[in-house]
Image (cartoon, rainbow, N blue to C red):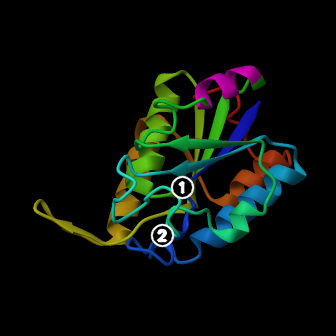
Amino acid sequence: MRALLVIDVQNEYFTGALPVSHPPDSLARVLEAMDAAARYRVPVAVVQHAAADPQAPAFGLNSPGWELVPEVARRPRDILIAKKLPGSFTGTGLGPWLESLGADTVAICGYMSQMCCDTTSRQAFHRGLGVEFLSDATGTLDIANQAGKVTAEELHRAVLVTQAMRFARVLTTAQWIDTLAGKGRDCSQGL
């Protein structure tokens, strides 16, 4: 059995301090994945990040940026997971919830590709779960810091290539939906 993890699809990435820019239609693909999960009865966990410091400039608890994007908030979900660190398993009830379902595979969509999505994928892999990483339903933005600069497109591509090396089966949302419909190779038995 698989479950869909919708990671940090929050206003911070659209109207806040960290606007996601690549892939440009990633939110539409997240919504397609959620709709397909509902259609094929795939359990959905929506994960919501909050900064450890409620006064933080991004993801402050109960701030406008912390809120789920309205389109995600109004879609069906089976559980809402609150987290404070990049990994969706760390300090949360995600692991026990997946175990209670008998899930052996997680599909990952949301933000950001290189941070919470990548970390959660690696955590799932380390737990022995199969991972499906939705390439067009995850996204990021241009990053510049003391280590250098990277465009959103370059960073996203590097994450996808790395995920495909070891941790996950990288799929488009359409390919994932075909798998649910029985038209594609199933990854539910792990990697």
Residue positioned 81% across, 46% down in the render: 180
Residue positioned 62% across, 59% down in the render: 172
Q: Quadrant of residue 76?
A: bottom right
Q: Is residue 95 magenta?
A: yes
Q: Quadrant of residue 142?
A: bottom left
Seen from the viewer's position, the closer of residues 38 and 168 is: 38
Q: Which mark is residue 8?
A: 1
Seen from the viewer's position, the closer of residues 57 and 19 is: 57
Q: Is residue 153 above or below residue 3?
A: below
Mark 2 secondary-structure assignment: helix
The stretch of residues the image draws in magenta is 94-100
Residue positioned 50% across, 65% down in the render: 63
Q: Residues within 10 Å of mark 2 (few under 14, many from 20)?
A: many
Q: Residues within 10 Å of mark 1 (few under 14, many from 20)?
A: many
Seen from the viewer's position, the closer of residues 185 and 64 is: 64
The image shows a total of numbered marks equal to: 2
Say which amino acid is labelled 2.
Answer: Tyr
Q: Is residue 183 magenta?
A: no
Q: Disc 2 designates what residue?
A: 13
